[in-house]
Image (cartoon, rainbow, N blue to C red):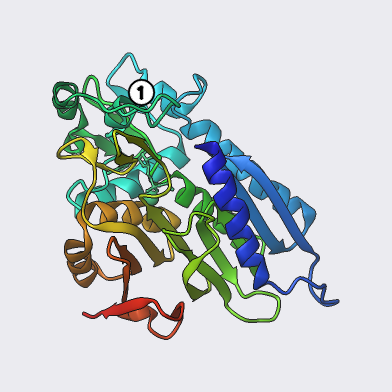
Amino acid sequence: MKKNHMHRGIVLAGMISLFLFVSGCGFMQAYQEIQFFAMDTLMQVELSGKKSDIEQIRKIVEDLEDDVSVTDVQSELYQINHRTVSAIELSKPIARLLNEELAITETTNGALNPALYPISCAWGFTTDHKRVPSAEELAALLPKTDWRQIQLSNQNLTLPDGMELDFGATAKGFASDLCADYLREQGIKHALLNFGGNTYTIGTNKKGEYWKIGIRDPWDETAQGMIGVLESTNEAVITSGSYERYFEQDGVRYHHIMDGTTGLPVRTGLVSVTIVCESGVKADGLSTALFVMGLDQASNYWRQYKGFEAIFVTEDGKQYYTEGLENRYHPTQGQKAEVIRL
Ligand code: ADP
Ligand code: MG
């Protein structure tokens, strides 16, 4: 699993740097780059700013990882999941993350469900022991995943017995929001955060052009192929794909995005969903939720709620993108592509 992510990160980072103009410009701040591992992912950051800025980015991500780890006994999330009382006071950042995630949980009617952790555990996605749980096992776990019973008021969280949370679907997007907040406060004009395919763009590249983000070809095992390129500024561009984490048993492939109504990996005919919008949590959360919904329901969700754009790739190899991207998304030549309209 880690290798998978590392590979993807390196290649995507490589792809993106193809588009970067990295020679120094005298009037600008120095160009800084850093790569590090956090959240099971190779994180790559490029910005024009001070060395301390890039170090701060690393610290923000590592601090968040310490808070949201499901396995580290010191983490805030571990404390939540191993609580001895039903009411807990959250730290400010975790309250913000959960609050923003729950807003998406509600509008997607639970397609994004932070309480599916027991299901992900049963499938072994949280460890290296992946397995297919029995129908009885899943049936016993599903009642523990009723997100409607999560009560959050400011920093006060109340959970029913047996419920366990996981921020796997939103933590990387949230990390990019925290970093973007910091970079804006520092007045940074050029930055690209690439958290293993979860990207966030600030300003322009050094040529003064929009950043160019390659959207990964889900069928390219080398992870180098792109189905298209998006011109991007001041926003998150985040993809969820069934090819990211999976295992095979008796010829069947089981991936890591779960349907909370059945406890099974989702099968809606999508292989990837990319969301483009200003908030990293929203882009990350919606990329998972719209994957769960499938193309038709997801298109209607976009028509109803707006405020974001999307690129969907279906199992039959076709891509569909929302009309707000028409002038800045460029499908690779030869790709079958259709625009989703209001
Ligand atoms: P990735 O971690 O590969 O970037 P996602 O952002 O799509 O992928 O998040 C998937 C992760 O979210 C899973 O590994 C699991 O921890 C959690 N998860 C799986 N299904 C759901 C769901 N329906 N709602 C919320 N979280 C989910
Ligand atoms: Mg996600």
Q: Does residue 112 lie above or below 239 as drawn?
A: above
Asked if residue 23 can be seen in this view, the reply is yes
The residue positioned 53% from the left and 45% from the top of the image is 5
Numbered disc 1: secondary structure: helix
Q: Report the front residue among 265 and 151.
A: 265
State which quadrant residue 280 falls in: bottom left
Q: Across the whole image, how many numbered discs are drawn on residues?
A: 1
Answer above or below: position of 64 versus 229: above
Q: Looking at the picture, which amino acid does disc 1 mark?
A: Asn
Residue 163 position within the rendered picture, expressed as x and y whole percent measured from the top left: 25, 25
Nearest the viewer among 39 and 241 is 241
Q: Residues within 10 Å of mark 1 (few under 14, many from 20)?
A: some
Residue farthest toward the bottom in the current orientation of the protein: 327
Q: Which residue is tagged 1?
A: 81
The residue sitting at 56% across, 73% down in the picture is 212
Residue 191 visible somewhere in the drawing? no
Instruction: Judge from the rendering whether residue 6 lies leftward or rightward of residue 126; answer left or right.
Output: right
User: Furthest-front residue in view?
Assistant: 251
Side of 111 relative to 178 (left or right): left
The image quadrant where one finds ligand 1 is: top left
The extreme top residue here reads 84
Residue at 49%, 19% (x, y): give it: 73
Q: In which quadrant of the rendered view does residue 36 lie?
A: top right
Does 37 appear above or below 332?
A: above
- Residue 12: horizontal and vertical position, in percent? 58, 59
Q: Which residue is nearer to you in this view: 27 or 263?
A: 263
Residue 170 placement, left or right of 199: left
Measured as percent of width and height from the top left, residue 16 is found at 61, 66
Q: Position of residue 23 (x, y in %)?
A: 81, 73
For the C terminus, which image quadrant? bottom left
At x 58%, y 37%, the residue is 63
Please, is residue 119 above or below residue 318 in the view?
above
